[in-house]
C-alpha cells in the first residue's frame, strides 16, 4: 500500500503522463526506423510499451517510475485462474489414481 507521499507522487506522474507526448521509440502502435526515419505500423504489446516507458529518463532519473511499476504489476495479475485450476485438477486425478493408501 502506498503512503500518502507515494500516492501523491503517483498522482503527479499520472497527471504528467496524461499530457505527455511519447517519443517515437515508445509509440504503442508504430516502430521508427532510426536510419531511414520511416515509421511502420507494427503493433507493440502492452508489456513492451510499459517496459519502454520504464526505461525513459528525465535528468538522469526514470520519468515515470511509479506509474510504470504499477502498470507492470497490474499486467502480472492473471486474466483468469483456469490454468492453475487445471493443474490442481490434474494433480488431484493423479493422486486418486496413484494413491498408496488404496
Image (cartoon, helix red, strand yellow):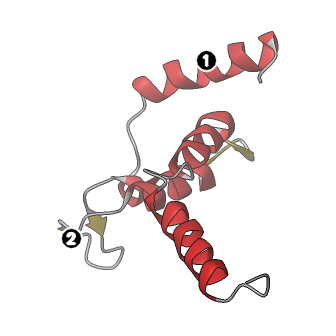
Above or below 72: residue 7: above
- On screen, residue 7 versus residue 41, left or right, reads right
- On screen, residue 54 versus residue 5, left or right, reads left
Instruction: Pinpoint residue 10: horizontal percent, then vertical percent.
Output: 65, 23
Instruction: Pinpoint residue 75: horizontal percent, then vertical percent.
Output: 51, 49
Q: Are marks 1 and 2 in contact (CB under 8 Å)?
A: no
Q: Residue at x 62, y 79 (%)?
A: 96
Instruction: Pinpoint residue 95: horizontal percent, then vertical percent.
Output: 66, 79
Q: Residue at x 33, y 63 (%)?
A: 44
- Name, please, the residue furthest toward the left: 41
> How many numbered callouts?
2
Instruction: Pinpoint residue 40: horizontal percent, then vertical percent.
Output: 19, 69
Q: Where does the C terminus fall, quadrant-wise? A: bottom right
CA separation in Å, label 1 and label 2: 34 Å
Categorize mark 2 by other alpha carbons within 10 Å: few (<14), some (14-19), many (20+): few
Q: Which mark is residue 38?
A: 2
- On screen, residue 41 versus residue 16, left or right, reads left
Above or below 95: residue 75: above
State the residue position of label 1: 12
User: Quadrant of the rendered structure where residue 26 is?
Assistant: bottom left
Categorize mark 1 by other alpha carbons within 10 Å: few (<14), some (14-19), many (20+): some
Amino acid at each position: 500500500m502506498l503512503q500518502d507521499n507515494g500516492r501523491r507522487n503517483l498522482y503527479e506522474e499520472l497527471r504528467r503522463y496524461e499530457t505527455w507526448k511519447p517519443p517515437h521509440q515508445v509509440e504503442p502502435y508504430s516502430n521508427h526506423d532510426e536510419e531511414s526515419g520511416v515509421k511502420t505500423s507494427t503493433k507493440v504489446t502492452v508489456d513492451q510499451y510499459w517496459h519502454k516507458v520504464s526505461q525513459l529518463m528525465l535528468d538522469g532519473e526514470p520519468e515515470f517510475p511509479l506509474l510504470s511499476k504499477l502498470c507492470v504489476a497490474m499486467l502480472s495479475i492473471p486474466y483468469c485462474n483456469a490454468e492453475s485450476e487445471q493443474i490442481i485438477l490434474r494433480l488431484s486425478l493423479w493422486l486418486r489414481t496413484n494413491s498408496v493408501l488404496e
